[in-house]
Image (cartoon, grey):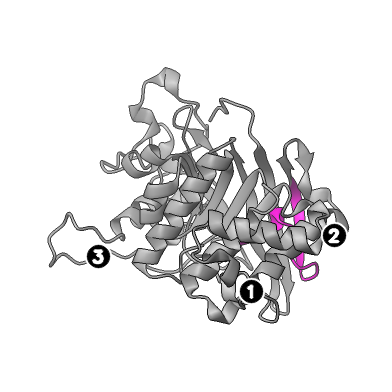
Amino acid sequence: MQITETPILEVNNLAVEFATHGGTVQAVRGVSFHVAKGETLAIVGESGCGKSVTVQALMGLIPIPPGKITSGEARLDGQNILNLSPRQANQFRGVKIGMIFQDPMSSLNPTMTIGDQIGETLKVHLGKSQGEAFAMAIELLEKTHIPEAAKRARQYPFEFSGGMLQRAMIAQSLACNPSVLVADEPTTALDVTIQAQILELMQELQKSENMSIVLITHDLAVVARMADRVAVMYAGQIVEAGSVDDIFYRSSHPYTLGLKIAMPSNKHDRDKQLTPIPGSPPDLFMPPAGCGYFSRCPHAMSICRAHLPGVTDMSDSQFSRCWLQEAGAPDVPELHQRKNLPEQQVTATTGPLDAG
């Protein structure tokens, strides 16, 4: 897959593991992706696939020990942010890259007012005085559409609703105008109405600030609304990536197909049952030698068990990590397959096939 412009954030071959009493968990295994200026990249996958660990590594939030970044680099505006010291990382966070956490109540200090917490970011990173920081905090709360912002800035987190807490978190993350905003499942704990408002707010601020967003989610409906491009993660790896249209209309990996089929839709008969993905993800204490999806894939071949598939470029915008994209693999009618594309549009990944 070709990169058509210089990315603001580029991650290459990132690997993260955790040492536990039961052994070493290989949580992230060679993840690579890029994000352009003003673009939204959604990283999607089921719980435990490694998507949150990936962005925590970028933010310097992996606890070391037990965590350890074993390989890779992540360049933001050309600087490798994985090599920063704890002090450098603390200065970098919030200024170049901001983060919205899944649960704002556990991420905010219950003993400080909302205005003081936002103002603390401005004092530390921009050198503002207490008065200047508090005034700017009120402006940020107004920007995120919190009513009576001056009054709310003097209140504590327990006095805010879930939706307002998430708006306050967004205000805090935008305090220093970061180039990239990481949003780790920012609407999971919210009801549908408030969820829509938060997503609309993020899009509004992204446009006004020309900001890039890395959105972590397991909700394909959120992906369809927010994303320009999508990376699908499974068992610590990105198994497919492409534009949002590629992922929804030209899925090239069986796991992506499984996610779509399992998603509720109002276009089908109400009596039709959802089709869940059977089985469980592999044990990342001992990752499989081949494709991590082998045991759950309805189209698995014997080569999938023994050999890890390479990356196959489906087009300039899409790639897939699947043996079914090899010449000679069985046809899967519902799957967008490389061998059905014009030859000049693809880059083959060679390897022996055994469909036995």
Q: CA distance from mark 2 to mark 1?
A: 31 Å
Q: Amino acid at mark 2?
A: Pro
Q: Tell whether 185 sits left or right of 182.
A: left
Q: Secondary structure at mark 3?
A: loop
Disc 2 to disc 3: CB gap under 8 Å: no
Q: Position of residue 232 (x, y in %)?
A: 48, 50
| Label number found at residue 86 | 2
Closer to the N terminus: mark 3 or mark 1? 1
Disc 1 marks which amino acid? Arg
Q: Depth check: give the residue in front, 125 or 236.
A: 125
Q: Position of residue 317 (x, y in %)?
A: 47, 31
**How packed is label 3: few (under 14 Cα within 10 Å), some, or many (20 or more)?**
few
Q: In terms of depth relative to the viewer, which is nearer, 111 or 341?
A: 111
Mark 2 or mark 3, which has the lower sequence index? 2
Q: Nearer the viewer, mark 2 or mark 3?
A: 2
Residue 64 part of the magenta segment: yes
Q: Name the residue tied to disc 3.
A: 274
Please tell me whether mark 1 sits on a helix, a strand or a loop: loop
Q: Amino acid at mark 3?
A: Leu
Residue 98 sits inside the magenta stretch: no
Residue at the disc numbered 1 = 154
Relative to 238, is 65 on the left or the right? Answer: right
Residue 55 visible, this angle: no
The circle on residue 70 is none
* Tag 2 and tag 1, C-beta contact below 8 Å: no
Crowdedness of circle 2 by 10 Å Cα count: few (<14), some, many (20+)? few
Residue found at x 53% / y 63%: 167
Callout 2: SS: helix
Sequence-first tag of 2 and 1: 2
For the magenta stretch, what is the residue range? Answer: 52-72
Residue 94 at least partly seen: yes
